[in-house]
Amino acid sequence: MAQVLEFKLPDLGEGLTEAEIVRWLVEVGDVVAIDQPVVEVETAKAMVEVPCPYGGVVTARFGEEGSELPVGAPLLTVAVGATDASSASPGGDRAAAEEPSGGSGSGSGSGNVLVGYGTGAPAARRRRIRPERNTVPAAPAAPAVVSAPSRPAPVAVAVGEVNGRQGPVAVVSPLVRRLARQHEIDLRGLTGSGPDGLILRADVDSAIRQTGQATEAAARTAARPATRTAAEPVVAETPTVQVGAAAPATAERIPLRGVRGAVADKLSRSRSEIPDATCWVDADATELMAARAAMNAASGPSGGPKVSVLALLARICTAALARYPELNSTVDTAAREIVRLPGVHLGFAAQTERGLVVPVVRDAHTRNAESIGAEIARLTELARTGKLSPAQLTGGTFTLNNYGVFGVDGSTPIINHPEAAMLGVGRIMPKPWVHHGELAVRQVVQLSLTFDHRVCDGGTAGGFLRYVADCVEQPAVLLRTL
């Protein structure tokens, strides 16, 4: 006989507490193997495919694509021991024992363990749904004899009181209930668009917009003049319709969540906590571009990957940080200490369809330009396909931001908290330049350094930026440190 097991959204690490369902990889009735990816979720760090630790038939899924679930919320149920879809109940058993795979009995153990599930989980137990505040205690049930165990529908029903009305609410996520409470939305008046009437976050957002429009309409009606004489007849007002008039525009609200929400939080924290300052300089990059062309020509048609300008600038940054280690540090505000970091983990800004991400090249101080370039290319491809792991997006000590790819000359970068500095690079373009006392057309780039004024003063920051500019103008300066 098949045993129905419930698989919950695991702890994905890095302090993440929720994730958005991007795409389901299985349907109800599909047969899944142990450790087979079943859903693709987006966290504040990256896109992650979540493997299921059970093998069997999928009997229920919880959450629509686009909905947000907290860690620990049910993802799906699997009938372990079923050989086909017909051997499992389509409803699933939400109260089934949650025996971890790898335990005794089922023999369908998981070797691919994420944080929070897999081998070594607690013993079997029933899942209980906690009531909201002001919940009405359930009346004690009279003892009864049943002939067969009942199977509840795969929708978590929270019993509570909303706006003075009592009854069940078909809602899974506590985030949805909290959002409804904040905006005084009566969940009992909503029709869920999810399976079995499940109320999703999109349903609550729609109700919030409708409530706001109704409030505005009531305010406009109350603002109309209502004075009339006793002799005047009461005539019903007929709305005036203007032919060809456009409907009033409604502001679009875009939730700050996922990668965009994480970027917003980090940038806000950087601005509020770090007393930053920016200095910049124009540099003649003609010799650097010539050196890059010579390096790539010397490698030949099959001599390996081409060295990019970003890789050369990254190598220059690691050399500059060796001279000015103050900028490869962080501030421990609790201890009131500056922590100088032993190695350089170089982050670089990459624009993707999902937004701005900052992959990190580990131990960049131990790599040459070719090795850094290869790692940048590898991480960039992972970023474009949404396959970067949270570990590849954290732990940076210094960031290089090449905003010149957007066709701009300069910027004042925001430091990637908790780092101490960021180097920004504008576009390299031909400009008039005085070279050896004569006016000439040269390849010029603007370099901007934003730094934490707590870790160093302008002299150190200026020395770092001047060294970078000297290496750009005369790449032979860098050879002395190689």
Image (spheres, rainbow, N blue to C red):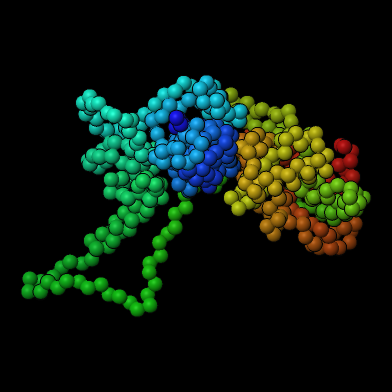
Furthest residue in direction left, as rendered: 231
Q: To which quarter of the image does residue 322 belong? A: top right
Place residue 343 in its image quadrant. top right
User: Which of these two is toward me, 79 or 132?
Assistant: 79
Q: Is residue 470 left or right of residue 226?
A: right
What is the x, y in percent for residue 18? 49, 38
Depth check: give the residue in front, 356 or 149: 149
Q: Position of residue 17 (x, y in %)?
A: 49, 35
Residue occupying the point 10% across, 74% down: 233
Q: Is 446 drawn above or below residue 155 in the view shown?
A: below
Q: Is residue 105 above or below residue 67?
A: above
Quadrant of the frame with the C terminus:
top right
The answer, for residue 247, to whether it is visible in the render is yes
Total labels drawn:
0
Residue 78 % position (x, y)? 48, 35
Q: Residue at x 21, y 29 (%)?
A: 139
On the image, the x and y values in percent for residue 141 come to: 23, 27
